[in-house]
Image (tube, coloured by chain):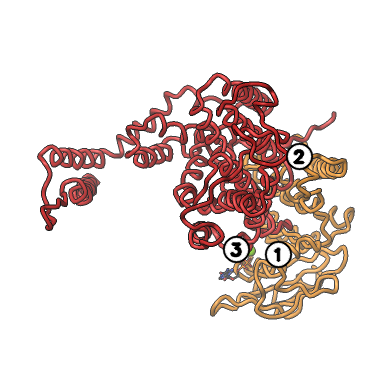
Chain colours: A orange, B red
Amino acid sequence: MLEIQNLAMRFGGLLAVDGVSLDVQEREIHSIIGPNGAGKTTVFNCMSGFYKPSGGKIIFQGKEIQGKPDYKISRMGMVRTFQHVRLFTQMSVVENLLVAQHRHLNTNLLAGLVKTPNYRERERKSLDRAAYWLERIGMLDQANVDAGNLSYGQQRRLEIARCMVTKPQLLMLDEPAAGLNPAETLELNQLIVSLKEDYSVSVVLIEHDMNLVMDISDRITVINQGRPLASGTPQEVRANKDVIKAYLGEA
Amino acid sequence: MATSNVRHALFCAIVTIVISYPILGLNLEAEGINIVLTGTDATTIVAIACAALIVFLFQLFRDSVMGKLGAVSDLNPLTGRKPMEQDKRAKLESWVLTGLVVVALFWPFFSSRGAVDLATLVLIYVILALGLNVVVGLAGLLDLGYVAFYAVGAYTFALLSQYYGISFWMALPLGALLAGLFGLLLGFPVLRLRGDYLAIVTLGFGEIIRILLNNWTNVTGGPNGIGGIPDPTLFGMEFGRRVKEEGNTSFHETFGIAYSGEHKVIFLYLIALVLAIITALIIRRLMKMPVGRAWEALREDEIAARSLGLSRTAVKLSAFTIGAFFAGFAGTIFASKQGFISPESFVFLESAIILAIVVLGGMGSQIGVILAAIAVTILPELAREFSEYRMLIFGAAMVLMMIWRPQGLVPMRRLHITLKTQE
Ligand SMILES: Nc1ncnc2c1ncn2[C@@H]1O[C@H](COP(=O)(O)OP(=O)(O)O)[C@@H](O)[C@H]1O
Ligand SMILES: [Mg+2]
């Protein structure tokens, strides 16, 4: 469903991403790994429309999307989380989930002012969906808390839920396990698998936690200094000499 | 540290002297055909010296003085208190507002004409400030040219009544819609800009509109303005002594009461009151609607908001347009109240005053904005003898405000939508 061909991103003299290609199938967890500064987040930024790639193609469901504005890509069904959590900290947890459903709500001003049945109906549905996902990530009792007051692990989970309420087809998670304790990582692990199994989304995952990556990935792409190093199933990647030398070997 | 403090304080004192001596201490006097420079009397010089000394001492002990000032707020019994429960606060706020409205409804019948007239002006500022609050407070766009939309509303009514004999009630929606349209058109190119740049460009647009009105003489009358703007009518009843418009009746004759100029003033006041209430109610609802949340989301974290499919331009444009719409409302009432408008009424200072109301009131808070509008309009009237120092007091108030309560008189706390979980 997603195909990246020869992606390149240049910042002045620095070629942060150079010739990266990967493809993601329906209901697949595809991980991108590589040392810090390898260009993983930059790939995400190109995919989600924050950067206009200097070269290459990104094809999502048959349409070229490179260089499209970020909000349009998001509306097409490709939604991301951030390496550093970006919640609306002064808004409550539910409201974070409602903002994400903006486009599923009735945003007609007049309809909202007079509260037409359609407006109420869609608001109720959105609240229900928010409640569903809060239940799913075990945070229903936090619904009316300001997002800024959540623990770090909860913020991470809320960010994923916030993506899920937009009904995406492809989810991009940028180091979702960073800063989590082992128990939380395990929970996250199960959540990501369930997203694929139960909700049929494809996941592109950037992650440093090797156990997590090897455990849940269907395929892995390794990049190093912006260049693709290897790709394949976890077994293949684990056995790849270049990878062992450049990355796994160090750890 | 101590030496750098002394240096800094000395520098500030010298700046004080350099600025104030030429302005206060030197006078240009005409002597025949020559102009001579004369120094002033000793008292002024002493005053300047005192001022410099005060500045010096303040800067020298600045840290401890500011520390004490900061501590003063601890004496405020409200500071340490936990914020009220959302439900309770909402209830209290609606009680206070209802009370205010009831008082405001009956008050004009017991007051002087001048007071009611002034109150109408306050209400116009309330509408303006509530509208600008959407742009600045809720959407976080610093708009320094807001007065332009106010002018569009006022001139729409003035021109349409002059050329097409349109009535107040027709002009009210038209003025607001046209102002909103202007907001949309002007907003489209400028909303790509951020922060300071946006402020500067909107400032420029505000001036462009004023200059246009000033120079397009054959349509707008230029600096001479437009007069004879009709008063509002009540179901075809006019409030003047004699009926001007064919087919209308006059208010005092219909009701068989003596003519009084006060009727018209009170009527206008009530219209302004109703429109201010409508404005407040609409904006209150907007804040709880998806668009209100989108404004806040975009203000809080634009990148996250866009990653969730919010279009920055569309969301910000909606705030800009809605704000302009209400300015158009206010402009129509203003034109009708004055009966005469000219570009003079739409200078940058107006934008600054409206912005000051929003900032003083606490961005995003409605009661705060209403209180601030009252304060900013009425205080200068009460203290007419200080009118020369109006801007000085204004500036000082703003500085003190930023030190003590940067969040405004009544800081905003948006009503959260709550998820009620059924057990
Ligand atoms: N906006 C930018 N401007 C300039 N350089 C950037 C920018 N974003 C990323 N880089 C550079 O690109 C390289 C890859 O960064 P990044 O994609 O964040 O790595 P990773 O996520 O794999 O740790 C780094 O050298 C980083 O400094
Ligand atoms: Mg990264």
- In this view, the mark in front (2 or 1): 1
Is ligand 2 less than 8 Å from the beta carbon at label 2? no
Q: Report x, y in % for residue B329.
A: 63, 44
What is the quadrant of residue A226 in the picture? bottom right
Residue type at the position of mark 2: Met
User: Residue at the location (79% across, 75% down)?
Assistant: A64
Q: Circle 1 is placed at which residue position? A: A70
Q: Which mark is residue A26?
A: none
Q: Spatial distance from mark 3 to mark 1, Cα to Cα?
A: 15 Å
**Image-quarter location of ligand 2:** bottom right
In the rendered view of the protein, which quadrant contains the C terminus of chain B?
A: top right
Q: Spatial distance from mark 3 to mark 2, Cα to Cα?
A: 37 Å
Q: Spatial distance from mark 2 to mark 1, Cα to Cα?
A: 29 Å
Residue type at the position of mark 1: Asp
- In this view, the mark in front (3 or 1): 3
Is the residue A12 above or below the residue A127 in the image? below
User: Residue at the location (57% across, 21% down)?
Assistant: B107
Return the disc, 2 or 1, that comes first in the chain's sequence: 1
Residue at disc 1, secondary structure: helix
Residue type at the position of mark 3: Arg
Q: Circle 3 is placed at which residue position? A: B192
The answer to whether the residue labelled 3 contacts the one labelled 1, judged by CB atoms less than 8 Å apart, is: no
Q: Circle 2 is placed at which residue position? A: A139
User: Residue at the location (58% across, 52% down)?
Assistant: B155
Mark 1: few, some, or many residues within 10 Å (few <14, many ≥20)? Answer: many
Residue at disc 2, secondary structure: loop
Q: Is residue A70 found left or right of A63 in the rendered image? A: left
Mark 2: few, some, or many residues within 10 Å (few <14, many ≥20)? Answer: some
Mark 3: few, some, or many residues within 10 Å (few <14, many ≥20)? Answer: few
